[in-house]
Amino acid sequence: MKIIDASVRTFWYTTHEETDSDGHAHPGPARRVKKALLTLTCEDGTSGHAFGSPEQLRPHLLERFIRPVVLDQDALARERLWQDLAHWQRGSGGQLSDRTLAIVDCALWDLAGHLLKAPVYKIIGSYRDKVPAYGSIMCGDELEGGLATPEDYGGFAEKLVARGYQAIKLHTWMPPVRWSPNIEMDLKACSAVREAVGPKFPLMLDAYHWYSREEAYELGKGLEALNFTWIEEVMDEQSMSSYAWLTQELKIPVIGPESMGGKYKHRAEWIKAGACDILRTGVEDVGGITPALKTMHLAESFGMNCEVHGHGAENLAISAATKNCRWYERGLLHPFLDYDACPEYLNRIPDPMDEEGFVWLSQEPGLGEDINFEYIDANLAE
Ligand SMILES: O=C(O)[C@H](O)[C@@H](O)[C@@H](O)C(=O)NO
Ligand SMILES: [Mg+2]
């Protein structure tokens, strides 16, 4: 079955989030922003879809890289098509990012799901049909009643436990918050949450990403005293040796890398260097479901868990198709935002969570996004 078309639709939708100068999300006034949808269509009319940003699916990338690789190719040849795209990255002058690779790969997996009439996680080979979720709290802010104080975090954590979450991860305060970064405040927030949820509830911290070794050590020792489950991205992940040092110095598991490129091969170097106790991957971070699965299997070979960064149908699918990850990262969460509210461009959210804190996989064919095409076509950006 051959792919005969690759197209992109850009459309408007309403968001209630804004991004700060470090790229972290926070609640914001409702505003209209653009999103893009890649569609790959086969000769029999079957199509596969994946969302991205207009920039990650801009016309130059569609014409110069995506179409030349996928058109007239076997729709099920995902491994070869992913390798072909990945090899073009070197000669793309930095234009072809892992994010764009991830969108194409996800559309190919969605297409396979529709062709084979099965959910993607079952095409991969399911390990479970529901995944326990941790609530991933947004970075701190200075919003009255938001996430401005340690008490705000403690109060919000109580609500998340009542909602059913089986674990909670804090992102604490980072610039542009005036007085951050601040280890003392990080630990006060973590302590307030520990107080709120009790001594055994699993907690994790993902803090300011540029602490020094000494600061990261101080923060890690503080988390050990609070019985936290892992410490995440507290130093610049470009310094693998710093993480190898920290992993040696701390008892609390160190997880990473999240933000680094290099796909599964760079993550193999982190394992070889002893730079993490738990590996980290993410469909968007490593260039798709195809390389993310390679990363998880790599970790499994070393007896390590590999926790998946980010929410969404694609990250949920790989979490359900592998044994060596404990959680689905459901978020980002904030007291002012209703995470369960369905975006206008979908008919249902991809990660509904039950009262016990399990996210159930869709049994529909494909990736698990129930796309509202009528809305998209009625709100095209061109
Ligand atoms: O921008 C970031 O640092 C991440 O997106 C962050 O908000 C969150 O997704 C994360 O780090 N999860 O682990
Ligand atoms: Mg993180």
Image: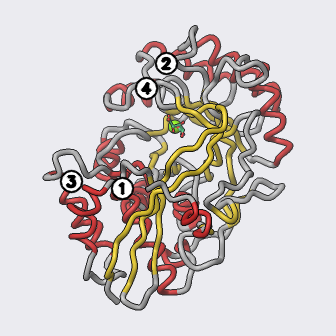
Residue 317 is situated, as x and y percent measured from the top left of the image, at: 55, 65
> At x 73% / y 17%, what residue is drawn?
149
> At x 78% / y 33%, what residue is drawn?
157
Q: Is residue 85 above or below residue 118?
A: above
Is the residue under label 4 in contact with that under label 2 (CB below 8 Å)?
yes
Is the residue under label 4 in contact with that under label 1 (CB below 8 Å)?
no
Amino acid under label 2?
A: Tyr
Q: Nearer the viewer, mark 3 or mark 4?
A: 3
Amino acid under label 1?
A: Leu
In front here: 119 or 264?
119
The numbered mark, 3 or 1, whose residue comes first in the sequence reads 1
Q: Nearer the viewer, mark 3 or mark 1?
A: 1
Q: Which residue is under mark 4?
A: 246
Q: Quadrant of the C terminus?
A: bottom left
Q: Nearer the viewer, mark 3 or mark 2?
A: 3
CA neighbours of label 2 inside 10 A, class few (<14), some (14 to 19), many (20+): some
Q: Is residue 341 above or below residue 65?
A: above
